[in-house]
Amino acid sequence: MYSITVRNNILIAHSLPGEVFGPAQNLHGATYVCDAEFFAKKVNEYNIIMDLGVVTTILAEVLKFYSYKNLDDIDEFKGIITSTEFLAKDIYERICVRLKNDYLDDYHQLHKIKITLTESNVAWASFEQEIE
């Protein structure tokens, strides 16, 4: 299996309702390092999975949706606990939409995508899913 990974970061604010979250129930900020890893069983005719510039741009554009925003104020997140795990899956889904819309041939060559959001040097969460 081949893979390529690109990295960017986002700064967000949000609150996480529920006693399980302790002090994070209150509005707080988070800075995430976001790694997007793209897997393929084979490389294309250029011996690559995809153009690194393309996936770097896609990740940056997707992350603009979240960056420097209070996620509690985003209408589509109303009533949703925007945990790190939730955000990793949401980023995955937005990347897939962009790939399907603009890079369908590359999308069909992918086996899976994994999104990892690192909160600190000791804590991170990921979402990965095979391409259907």
Image (spheres, grey):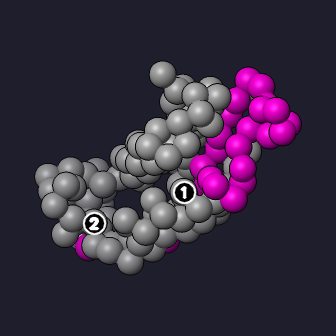
x, y percent for residue 62? 45, 59
Identify the mark at residue 58; answer none if there is no mark: 1
Whether 111 is among the magenta residues is no
x, y percent for residue 115? 55, 46
Identify the mark at residue 71; answer none if there is no mark: 2
- Residue at the location (26% across, 59% down)? 16
Horizontal side, residue 116 vs residue 62: left or right: right
Front in this rendered view, residue 95 or 116: 95
- Residue at the location (54% across, 57% down)? 58
Horizontal side, residue 100 vs residue 82: left or right: right
Horizontal side, residue 42 vs residue 12: left or right: right
Identify the mark at residue 42; answer none if there is no mark: none
Q: Identity of the amino acid at label 2?
A: Leu
Whether 38 is among the magenta residues is yes
Above/below status of 57 relative to 43 = below
Q: Secondary structure at mark 2?
A: helix
Front in this rendered view, residue 96 or 11: 96
x, y percent for residue 85? 42, 46
Q: Which region shows up in magenta?
A: 27-55
- Residue at the location (21% across, 55% down)? 77
Residue 85 in view (yes/no): no
Q: Residues within 10 Å of mark 2 (few under 14, many from 20)?
A: many
x, y percent for residue 104? 53, 36
Q: Secondary structure at mark 1?
A: helix
In the figure, residue 17 lies in which quadrant? bottom left
